[in-house]
Amino acid sequence: MSQVKIFCDFDGTITNSDNIISIMKKFAPPQWEKIKDDVLTERVSIQEGVGRMFSLLSTDLKEEIVSYILQTSKIRDGFDEFITYAKERGIPLYIVSGGIDFFVKPLLDGRIDEQFLYCNESDFSGASITITWPHSCDDQCRNACGCCKPSIIRQLATHQDFKIVIGDSITDLQAAKMADVIIARDFLIEKCEELELPYRPFATFHDVIEHIEQIVEVRA
Ligand code: MG
Ligand code: ZN
């Protein structure tokens, strides 16, 4: 049976800005920028780039980073209403995030059940932060995504399911290519236009609810 399923990015989508970028801007030495540029232009894989960026940071910074993120990062308008909306409609809402557990979980603050949350994990046992990759690419993906959104979608949805992918960046592109509907902002819009992928733009989760409501109505 075909079911609507939502796959929603976290950084820059649920939050107003990208938390990895804001952590690096605040805490990393300048060489992080070159790594970021190499990721954005697809010269370096996301997994390698994110791993290298966090390896620039001392594990002693953990508490400071988490409190900085909790003070500065904002959840996008309408997100709580969106969670309620999806629950009422009986639509599974999966968070698939290239973010890292140690800031994703405090920011979500229990809003999403763990079984619906897919993100990277971290190891603070060494001198610098090590990212672990519990959701790395399956044998059908060669992108070294880190948290592999296409692999997760293959695990969680069938070909028949109607897949809605919500995102903002290059890290959502491979998942977006699998979507029946893409709801996009920022750089993902540019990529969708470049590749002629159909998308709907959003600024807040109130917009997202409207788009999904239209989609659900058309299917009903
Ligand atoms: Mg993002
Ligand atoms: Zn992948």
Image: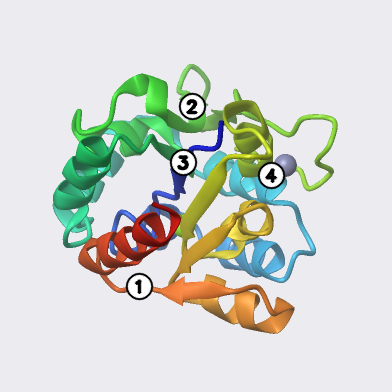
Residue 5: which numbered mark, if any?
3
Q: Amino acid at mark 3?
A: Lys
Q: Amino acid at mark 1?
A: Phe
Identify the residue shown where x is 64% and y is 45%: 52
Identify the residue shown where x is 47% and y is 60%: 167
Image x and y of residue 111, in percent:
20, 33
| Sequence-earlier tag: 1 or 2 | 2
Q: Which residue is mark 4?
A: 145
Residue 202: which numbered mark, if any?
1
Asked if disc 4 is less than 8 Å from ligand 2, the answer is yes
Asked if disc 1 is less than 8 Å from ligand 1, the answer is no
Position of 15 compared to 136: left or right?
A: left
Is 96 placed above or below 11 here? above
Q: The N terminus is located in which quarter? A: top right
Mark 4 to mark 3 CA distance (whole Å):
21 Å
Depth check, mark 4 against mark 2: the one in front is 4
Instruction: Give the structural element (helix, strand or loop) at label 1.
Output: loop
| Sequence-earlier tag: 4 or 3 | 3
Identify the residue shown where x is 26% and y is 41%: 89
Q: Amino acid at mark 2?
A: Ser
Instruction: Give the structural element (helix, strand or loop) at label 4.
Output: loop
- Looking at the rendering, the quadrant in which ligand 2 lies is top right
Name the one closer to the observer, 93 or 43.
93
Position of 208 compared to 197: left or right?
A: left
Name the one closer to the observer, 91 or 66.
91
Q: Which residue is mark 2?
A: 122
Residue extending farthest top: 125
- Disc 4 crowd, CA 10 A, few/some/many (<14, 14-19, 20+): many
- Disc 1 crowd, CA 10 A, few/some/many (<14, 14-19, 20+): many
| Sequence-earlier tag: 4 or 1 | 4
Picture quarter containing residue 65? Answer: top left
